[in-house]
Amino acid sequence: MFSNVINRKDEVLMSRAIRITAVTVMAMAATGVALAGMSPAQADTFHCTSYLSGAGYAITDDIGSSCSIGASDQAGAYFYCRDGLIDAHVSMTHAAAACDRADW
């Protein structure tokens, strides 16, 4: 008799675990679909340019290129990014913060 109670309790727990897993997988899939169209370098470049846009800078080709370099795996990418942004008249503080974001 007790085995039936234990089995029913196990079924309820298993059913709950399956529902939780299904919801988690669906949420992850929905997020993955939203991010699938953007490569990691593009996403990192976006962090950089978004930060600068929020700080009041107009995003020019020079700024976009510097952020792209910062998002690359190129040796010294951070320094090229920062120096390029400074050359594009971005303050050193904002350039450093933007290039940090390009490396996320």
Image: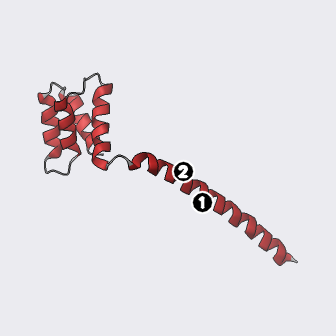
How are the residues colored? secondary structure
Q: Is 48 above or below relative to 5? A: above
- The residue sitting at 26% across, 45% down in the picture is 103
Considering the numbered disc 2 on the image, is that residue within a helix, a strand or a loop?
A: helix
Residue behind mark 1: 21
Amino acid type indicated by mark 2: Ala
Work out which residue is located at the far front of the displayed protein and give it: 37
- The residue sitting at 74% across, 68% down in the picture is 11
Dot 1 crowding, Cα within 10 Å, few <14, some 14–19, many 20+:
few
Quarter of the image for the N terminus: give it: bottom right
Q: Is 102 above or below relative to 89? A: below
Report whether 3 appears left or right of 72: right
Considering the numbered disc 1 on the image, is that residue within a helix, a strand or a loop?
A: helix
Name which quarter of the figure residue 92 lies in: top left
Residue behind mark 2: 27
Amino acid type indicated by mark 1: Thr
Q: CA distance from mark 1 to mark 2?
A: 10 Å
